């Protein structure tokens, strides 16, 4: 398959940071008890590629029966970012990723599409000193299918010439919805 661009998810696709993020979500809700933490972690694992703000709303309204506001979401996000950003910057690449980025970025445009807030994601990528590999780094509030459409428009790439590389159901669904090719990462290996 020839493609004109490759779009990569970040957590679990490029960087081994999924456990860091899951642990931080659990810590945010620790004061509500172990049962709530278990439910938070279960929902997170079922919705890994989804924006944290969608998760915060669900947890506040559904699990805790509390009113959700944008201010509460921003506060949870601030605390979550404080707990994870340095660890994600230091997290190791998945096997072969560094070599892949070095070689492939010279041949084809690479992009990042993540559920992480866009400015935070860009900061992480800059602090990791890998920003030069990517033509664009995109995150929430845009969904992954919106990001794929934006990349196709900006690069004049048709769906059958775009590859999405990811590790979540949301990554696959975004590729399917937009008509792009998809390659899945399972336990750090492509399939």
Image: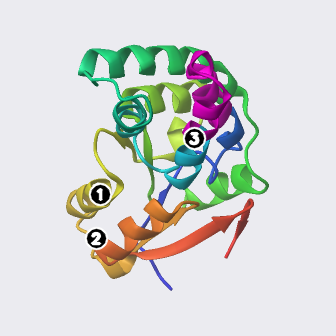
Identity of the residue drawn at 48% across and 50% down: 49
Q: Do residues under tags 1 and 2 come within 8 Å of each other at their CB atoms? A: yes
Q: Which residue is mark 3?
A: 39
* Mark 1 surroundings within 10 Å by alpha-carbon count, few (fewer than 14), some (14 through 19), many (20 or more): many
Q: Which residue is mark 1?
A: 151
Q: Position of residue 111 (x, y in %)?
A: 44, 52
Q: How many discs mark residues in the rendered view?
A: 3
Q: Do residues under tags 2 and 3 come within 8 Å of each other at their CB atoms? A: no
**Callout 3 secondary element:** helix
C-alpha separation, residue under disc 2 versus residue under disc 3 = 40 Å
Identity of the residue drawn at 53% across and 49% down: 48
Q: Does the magenta-highlighted stretch encompass residue 23?
A: yes
* Mark 3 surroundings within 10 Å by alpha-carbon count, few (fewer than 14), some (14 through 19), many (20 or more): some
Task: Out of 37 and 9, give the one closest to the viewer.
Answer: 37
* Mark 2 surroundings within 10 Å by alpha-carbon count, few (fewer than 14), some (14 through 19), many (20 or more): some
Depicted 120 relative to depicted 187: above or below = above
């Amino acid at each position: 398959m020839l493609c004109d661009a490759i779009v990569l998810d970040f957590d679990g696709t490029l960087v081994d940071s999924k456990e860091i993020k899951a642990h931080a979500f659990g810590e945010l809700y620790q004061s509500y008890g172990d049962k709530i933490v278990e439910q938070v972690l279960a929902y997170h694992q079922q919705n890994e590629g989804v924006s944290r703000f969608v998760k915060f709303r669900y947890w506040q309204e559904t699990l805790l029966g509390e009113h959700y506001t944008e201010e509460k979401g921003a506060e949870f996000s601030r605390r979550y970012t404080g707990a994870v950003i340095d660890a994600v910057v230091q997290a190791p690449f998945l096997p072969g990723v560094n070599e892949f980025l070095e070689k492939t970025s010279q041949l084809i445009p690479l992009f990042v599409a993540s559920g992480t807030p866009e400015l935070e994601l860009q900061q992480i990528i800059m602090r990791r000193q890998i920003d030069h590999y990517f033509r664009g780094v995109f995150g929430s509030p845009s969904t992954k299918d919106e990001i794929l459409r934006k990349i196709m428009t900006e690069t004049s790439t048709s769906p059958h010439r775009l590859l999405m590389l990811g590790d979540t159901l949301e990554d696959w669904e975004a590729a399917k919805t937009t008509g792009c090719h998809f390659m899945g990462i399972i336990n750090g290996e492509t399939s």
